[in-house]
Image (cartoon, grey):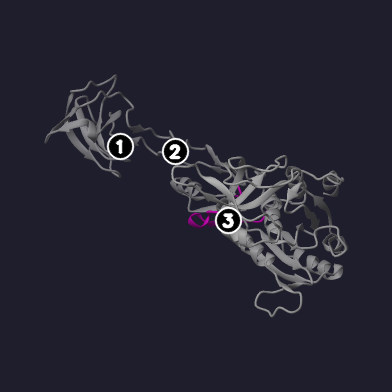
Amino acid sequence: MDAVVDQFSRNTLMSIAEACAAAIACARTVSRGESVRLVESAGRILAETFVACMASPPFTQSAMDGYALVAASGMSEGTRLKIVDRVPAGRSGRRLSAGEAARIFTGAPMPEGADAVVMQEHVERDDTSIVLTRRMTAGDNVRHQGEDIEPLEPLLKPGIRLDPRHVAMLAAQGEETVAVRSRLRIAVFSTGDELQDVGAMLRGAAVYDSNRPMLLSLIGQAGHDAIDGGRAADSRSEIAERLQMLSERSDLVISTGGASVGEEDHSLAALRHAGGSGRVLKIALKPAKPAIVGRIGPAAYLGLPGNPVASLVSWLILGQAMVGALQGRLHRPHIGYPLPIAAGFARRPGRTEFVPARLVSNKGQEVRAEIIGKGGAAQLRPLALADGLAEIAAECEDLRPGDLIRFHPFSGAFQG
């Protein structure tokens, strides 16, 4: 791992893609698995290839409410057909011959001999017969057996995050349970002499710890097992002890604070003191320029900055890259949606910047992204008012109204 990370050790800032590669190199796929009920599998990671055991549709069926008939090489408008049967879904009908029709409903099996279905809107009917009001050809409004899925066809690969679409497809195959990877165990602890737990009395220059509750919530919301690792003082030995303890029962250990290289930044030294290995990443990213990636015992390690917005951005970029690797998924960075900004925004080029933004639109105008606040890694109010994060490319200078940014909605970014 160190050899992979060492390639990023240089004075210049690394790109986000390079930082993600360094983070991924520290994560080893967790092989634990379990079987869960299909209806409880949404959000879980598929553990094995799923191969179709049956065709879908399982039989040739009507795609419409209408009348099954024998169209053969074609049947012209005005043709009269005798109604000889009624075929609801779940029941088979009698064989049809030329000149006959059967009332049929969506999903019902096609009668033997029938090769087309005319929609009920395209006939005129009396008590015993129908007259076509349009031309029909064989195959019209028919779902053929196996046209969606053939037996033994590979359908899903390991590493896919299951959602209701996959649940529907597996249910149509008759699956009651599904093999998934066990939930990741992700521990979070905070570092800093100035921090105090929520609910305690603030004294002196103390501040409440907002990072740990935020990260634990994000981890739980993404479907992982969140482990509250508490707080550690700004002490190499205390942080090292916490790292050792949490690594024994976690797949990923996250600390917040002390991720840079200042006198009071002890996380990297503590990681090495505890027997782990890692390196500070200096990323062309604002906020969240510094971060630490590494390993300790069986666990991956991620050291996040102490400011809350920087901590959030680091989690969404580096943390989710590591989580994907731990789950055996290919890394697919969030691309975001191109949107014009509503107002100008002053900035220096050089680092990709993420800032809180909300969606706005005036009557008759396109949707725009409105950047909230002036930026800042410690400001929580703009974050709470935002619909997502605006990503501003590193090369961009001051932005003018209408300039394009990439918008990352929180609704998708927090899935992990």
N-terminal label among 2 and 1: 2
- Tag 2: amino acid: Ala
Q: Is residue 42 magenta?
A: yes
- How far from the left and from the top, in percent, is residue 217? 62, 63
Q: Is residue 307 above or below residue 409?
A: below
Which segment did they paint magenta? 31-48
Residue 55: mark in rendering? 2
The residue lying toward the viewer, choosing from 85 and 344, is 344
According to the image, label 3 marks what residue? 386
Q: Residues within 10 Å of mark 1 (few under 14, many from 20)?
A: many
Mark 1 belongs to which amino acid?
A: Met
Residue at the far top in the pictured view: 73
Q: Is residue 283 left or right of residue 45?
A: right
Looking at the image, which residue is at 32% across and 28% down? 140
> Residue 147, position in %: x, y?
43, 33
Mark 1–mark 3 Cα distance, whole angstroms, equals: 45 Å
User: As displayed, is residue 237 above or below residue 219?
Assistant: below
